[in-house]
Amino acid sequence: MKPLACTIGVLVALLTGCASQRDVVTLDTRTHQLERRYAEMEKRYAAMDEKLVEVNDSRSQKDQHLRSQSAELRAVLDQSREEMRDLRGHMDEADHQLAQRVEAMEQALRQQDERLKKIEGYLDEPSARQRPVAGAPAAAAPAEPSEEARLYERARGFFDQGKFAQARDIFQELLNKYPKSDQADNAQFWIGETYYREKWFEKAILEYQRVIDAYPRGNKVPSALLKQGMAFEELGDAENAQLLFKELVAKFPKSGEARVAADKIKR
């Protein structure tokens, strides 16, 4: 910067030969002042450059840190989404399997109810209803049904209508009046059925047990064992249910109830 100042001073002196010495000193002083101000500005400019570099470096570090955190959060989010998809898949599969099991149980129950109705209908059908042989004399008019038969039919009518309390009362009336009736074991079984339909499974199990204990040679024992096992299933007691199904298969292997029990044992 000093050579530039000297050059300026010489030029000024040459151009203003008539200028006084005082004017030259004044110009030189101003020139030095300008040089100092220029130098100070350069220092300030350099300091500002350094600060700007520091700010940029700090911002770059912060941006890099934020990008790193963002990448980590994205990875965690992706993993959580994957786990949610897996969990949802397992839940859907479990729901599907449960629905299949429920449907199978309901179908087995419907088949069992139909089978029981057919058996009951066959047992309740009087022999006078058999189709007469062609050419044979007409059968005599059927006798008036007995009171116990009327009670049984009334109770079954209420049961079929879903009026289980009324049906239960009439079945119990039949048992009280005619404990030795041929329909006694059937009446006792249907009392158990009324509780089963009302989902009072504990009480149903006890009533089915009365069929087994009081009428061990009756035709309702296989049905009572099967429905006891199904009642335990409804209560979530699979162990006792399996024991009853196995007992049924062992004691009555040729019965229709045994086939249902064997299928439940496999499943």
Image (cartoon, rainbow, N blue to C red):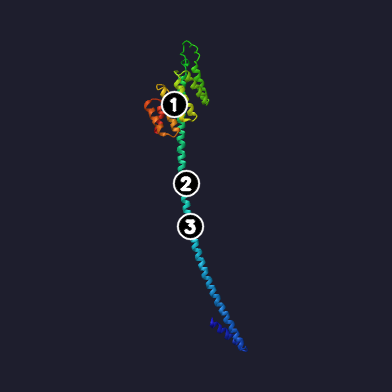
Sooner in the amino-acid sequence: mark 2 or mark 3 = 3
Question: Which residue appears at 58% of the width and 79% of the height?
Answer: 34
Q: Amino acid at mark 2?
A: Arg
Query: Which residue position is annotated with label 2?
Result: 85
Residues tagged 1 and 2 counted as in contact (Cβ below 8 A): no
Looking at the rendered image, the quarter that the N terminus falls into is: bottom right
Q: CA distance from mark 2 to mark 3?
A: 24 Å
Question: Which residue appears at 46% of the width and 43% of the height?
Answer: 89
Query: Which residue position is annotated with label 1?
Result: 208
Residues tagged 3 and 1 counted as in contact (Cβ below 8 A): no
Query: Which residue position is annotated with label 3?
Result: 69
SS at mark 3 in the image: helix
Measuring from the top left, give residue 27's x and y in whole percent.
Answer: 60, 84
Tag nearer the camera, 3 or 1:
1
- Residue 125 higher or lower than 23, as above or below: above
Q: Amino acid at mark 3?
A: Gln
Residue 111 visible in the snapshot? no
Measuring from the top left, give residue 199's x and y in whole percent.
Answer: 49, 30
Sooner in the amino-acid sequence: mark 3 or mark 1 = 3
Sooner in the amino-acid sequence: mark 1 or mark 2 = 2
Q: Amino acid at mark 1?
A: Tyr
